Image: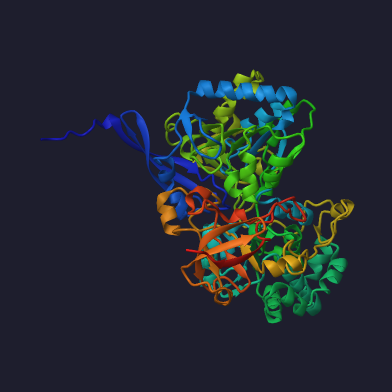
Amino acid sequence: MTTSKAPAAEFTRSTVKAACPHDCPDTCAMEVTVEQRAGKRVAIKVAGSAAHAPTQGVLCTKVSRYLERTYHPERVLRPLKRVGRKGEGRFEPVSWDAALTDIAQRLQAIAAVDPQRIVPYSYAGTMGLVQGESMAARFFHKLGASFLDRTICATAGAEALNYTLGTRAGTDVERFAESKLIVFWGCNAIASNLHLWSRAQEAKRKGAKLIAIDPYRSLTAEKCHQHIALLPGTDGALALGLMHVLVREGWLDRDYIERHTIGFEPLAQRAREFDPRRVAQLCGISAREVEQLAHDYWHIRPAAIRLNYGMQRAAGGGNAVRAVACLPALAGHWRDPAGGLLLSTSGMFNVDNAALQRPELLAGRRPRTINMSTIGRDLLHADPPIEALTVYNSNPVAVAPQSREVAQGFAREDLFTVVLEHFMTDTADYADYVLPATTQLEHVDVVKPYGHLYMMANNPAIDPVGEALPNTEIFRRLAAKMGFTEPCFRESDDEIAAQAFARVGVTSNYDWQVAKRDGWQRVAVAEHYAPFASGGFPTPSGRCEFYSQTLADMGLDPLPAYVPPHEGPVSRPDLARRYPLAIISPPARNFLNSTFVNVQSLRATEGEPTLDIHPLDANARGIVDGGRVRVFNDRGELRLRARVTDRARPGVVVALSIWWKKLAADGKNANELTSQALTDIGRAPTFYDCLVEVAPAAA
């Protein structure tokens, strides 16, 4: 018996330039190896681009296994219509034409009464500007649907930066290797910012000092020279304590303060209230740690702070970000490209939202706004009621706070729900229709990063799997079914991508054809870019605003303040007596929000949902390592496997997240316990502002 090789024409190999679309600051450049097999393109390898400076040829563990997502045996490959009760996950295949015809008719009937009863729900399942809010936004603008306030991740920090610095800009990730002090403030870079961590390791080899500020001894904290384990929600107090020492000791760049800031005197007066002893008591750390950190921050230069979004997920999250964002101006660290602060670079990119989203389709209407972080409450109590929900690029039943109420809202039989998805997620189980969407390997996109300075292009490597369609094409076809005739609904994805960035300022060099060819374009700034070395803050005053007149005009505190957690011994002593443990639920290393949870190899690495608890707290409750525990508060409970470890500080328990509820033994995740309370600035969720009690679970 002999085997013959396929003709050469049927078996060719090529490399396609792509970009990671997921909610991560690294936004890696990918190279997808594709084989042409009998007229069909098959992706066989995904790798990081060595030519892209931030990526350096390396992908994270999650995205390096992207083929397991794209070719997953459980991909949704045909439109599905619900045949069981909501939440059961019972569906039958239907044709695209039948699904879209019925969806259009249902939406038209609701819109005839009040289009605001229709709500889009989406976030960063893809960070792409094309497959995110382009054709979808056009569709909902034309319809007159409710606006969605997309707050679930970043708005507290983003708005705080805008009030302080005037924009979301910061230290170039490529310069961190030259820093002498790097402070990871609420940032587990190994899990969520791998390529910045590689720069930090390079800096460490050159003698830099690394400090982690985090309630949890994360993988990153373990590898830093020092770990300051403060209590959740007390970051603002620590930042004000550092200011206290800087002011007291005269460790201030007075020239920079005089030239490039406003409000120093009232800020200094505020800081005088936060002496190290008081800060130590508020934060659950030592006064010595406050003093030493301030000393290092002034004397070790250049110093860069990598601030991340976890620390803003508490009642005072916005003010905490404001306080930390003041520190580089006080100490003069903005002067050096390797100094300053990085929370986000997203303000560097002049996205042409008007071209992408076409707000003129609103025709003068001003629909109401629904906050995505309170979707559970709004599904049950909004007036007028939400009657239809279209979910894309998100999984709210798993990721939105106070999950039990979210599920109750999605379970309403009178709620018409359409979900665009790759898989049958917790949310998809509640849909009336599930429409198969393409993955990043199957469509065109442009990605705006928030951790580096390159506009990223994504070329489709393979044809759509099964009957999957890009989000854009789904909304194009639905617009046609609705009778929308405007030319913008017929634009191709390439035409949309070409309009992604306005050709002004630092994105004046944007050229879609060049970006497609090369995979990326760096914004037009110097190689050794220091955003505020000479001031130039785009605030109303043109200075770093320690004192914000804008906030004062809104009736808010114009200075950074310490706002204690909603749930804690200061704000709620009664609640703290019943539920004495603070719980946080930072990302598990092998998941990204709720993405990748169903990839078997990654889930096997994570094992099962666990709760890290300090030995002192475990012993007081009769909890043993490896035992099952019940974690509960007034909002709900869940059962987890205990890990007794000093990685969790006393008084704090840690549930690495976000698990799909259906893949947990008890059908729940940490959002069973979180609340819909919002932050002081930015209307954002307070996931890490949550009190619980823990007890051994019955066998």
Estimate the x, y position of residue 137 in percent, counting from the top left: 66, 32
Front residue (pair 545, 564): 564
Q: Quadrant of the N terminus?
A: top left
Front residue (pair 11, 644): 644
In this orientation, does residue 252 appear? yes
Estimate the x, y position of residue 508 in percent, counting from the top left: 66, 40
Front residue (pair 209, 380): 380
Estimate the x, y position of residue 196 in percent, counting from the top left: 55, 60
Indicate whether 590 appears above or below 624: above
The extreme front residue here reads: 698
The residue sitting at 89% across, 51% down in the picture is 553
**In the image, is 19 to the left or to the right of 41?**
right
Indicate whether 648 appears above or below 686: below
Number of labelled discs?
Answer: 0
The residue sitting at 56% across, 64% down in the picture is 177
Quarter occupied by residue 173 = bottom right
**In the image, is 82 to the left or to the right of 240?**
left
The residue sitting at 65% across, 54% down in the picture is 344
Quarter occupied by residue 574 = bottom right
Front residue (pair 22, 367): 367
The extreme bottom residue here reads: 288
Quarter occupied by residue 370 = top right
Indicate whether 88 appears above or below 400: above
The residue sitting at 76% across, 68% down in the picture is 573
The extreme left residue here reads: 1
In this orientation, does residue 124 appear? no
